[in-house]
Image (cartoon, helix red, strand yellow):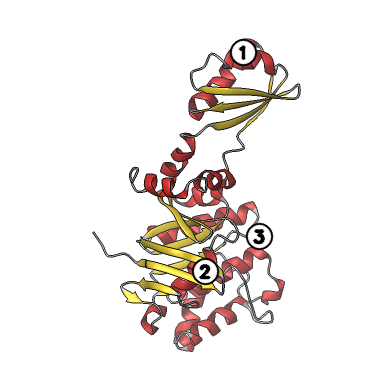
Amino acid sequence: MNAPTIELVSVSKWYGEVLGLRDVSIALGPGVTGLLGPNGAGKSTFLKCITGELRPSRGEVRLLGRRVPSLEMYRQLGCAPEIEVFFEELTAREFVVALGEMSGLSRKDAGARAEVVLHEVGMSHALDRPIATYSKGMRQRTKLAQALLHDPPVVLLDEPMTGLDPVGRAAMLEMIQKLGAQGRTVLVSSHILDEVESMTHAIVVLYQGQLLAQGDLYAIRAMIDRHPHRLVIECDKPRVLAQALSRELSVSSLRFQGDAVLEVETHGPDACYAAVPALALREGVKLRSLRSPDDNLGAVFKYLTEDPRKVRAEAQGGPR
């Protein structure tokens, strides 16, 4: 087994009486990993401990086998923070070159690399325009370019999709997946499950500074599916549809919300999703919408935080 690229060993970080991270131990390797958590979960603290911007109150962080922080470590790490601080009067080329020189590259080498990385992130058309004229998406791509300037094997991206339009989000997802395919270790923080699901199946879940789960996204979704999964159906004959669904083995309960909405609880969401349109067609029920309020990050965390010890045991392969 290869040595981990990023490793946190019993890391805790507190700010006075506020606990940012609580005894986090984790090892990550090459590829794209999604760092999931609601606002305030500890994602930024987690990333800042890896970059050396914050020192753990307890425990140790290692990057490529070296203890953080170290000068050699910084040569191996690229970071695009969520908060942006640009010199607005500079162009993207000037900005990226300046950061390259600060990192120890010669002006010539920084200029050559800036041209390459700005082209790779789709900024060739505007690399000599002042940053003050850039859209949010262009600023995000410029941040990514500076993170890649020195060709680092480890890349940290903090909420890189913020403010992007659908086209920009698709382009950013493609770039992130490409970085992972190149064999780099790419850690991407987000509070939106669908974004992470689009780029990787490997996730890390943080909540209130605790590591709740790590691994394949489908395995963590399966934890939810072992609990009642809710479907909300809008239709013209909810009572007729409820009678038909009551005979389905996957359905555990049915509730009405007014005269046009039926809420279904099921332990077999896939089977229930398939049964609803088939039964509606058979019974002559007109469906207006079919959705699940559980298919979002909030629902993931609602389950994960009900009994964190149980979730950690399940994520690690069974009850303890």
Quadrant of residue 222 within the rendered picture = top left
Residue annotated with mark 1 = 243
On the image, the x and y values in percent for residue 71 come to 39, 84
302 shown above or below 270: below
Quarter in which the N terminus is drawn: bottom left
Q: Mark 1 or 2 closer to N-term?
A: 2
Which residue is labeled 2 in the image?
A: 45
Query: For the residues marked 3 and 1, what is the alpha-carbon distance in whole angstroms?
Result: 45 Å
Q: Position of residue 42 (x, y in %)?
A: 53, 63
How far apart in space, not on screen, are marks 1 and 2 (Cα)? Answer: 51 Å
Q: Marks 3/2: CA distance?
A: 22 Å
Residue furthest out toward the front: 17
State which mark lies toward you, 3 or 2: 2
Where does the image place residue 154, in percent across and percent down from the top left? Answer: 40, 69
| Amino acid bearing label 2 | Thr
Q: Earlier in the sequence, mark 3 or mark 2?
A: 2
Q: Which residue is mark 3?
A: 163
Which residue does the image show at 59% across and 13% down from the upper left? Answer: 244
Eyeballing the image, is 214 above or below 277? below
Q: Is disc 1 placed on a helix, strand or loop?
A: helix
Check disc 2: other Cα within 10 Å, few if <14, some if 14-19, many if 20+.
Answer: many
Query: Which of these two is toward me, 261 or 308?
Result: 308
Picture residue at 37% right of the left edge, 73% below the top: 60
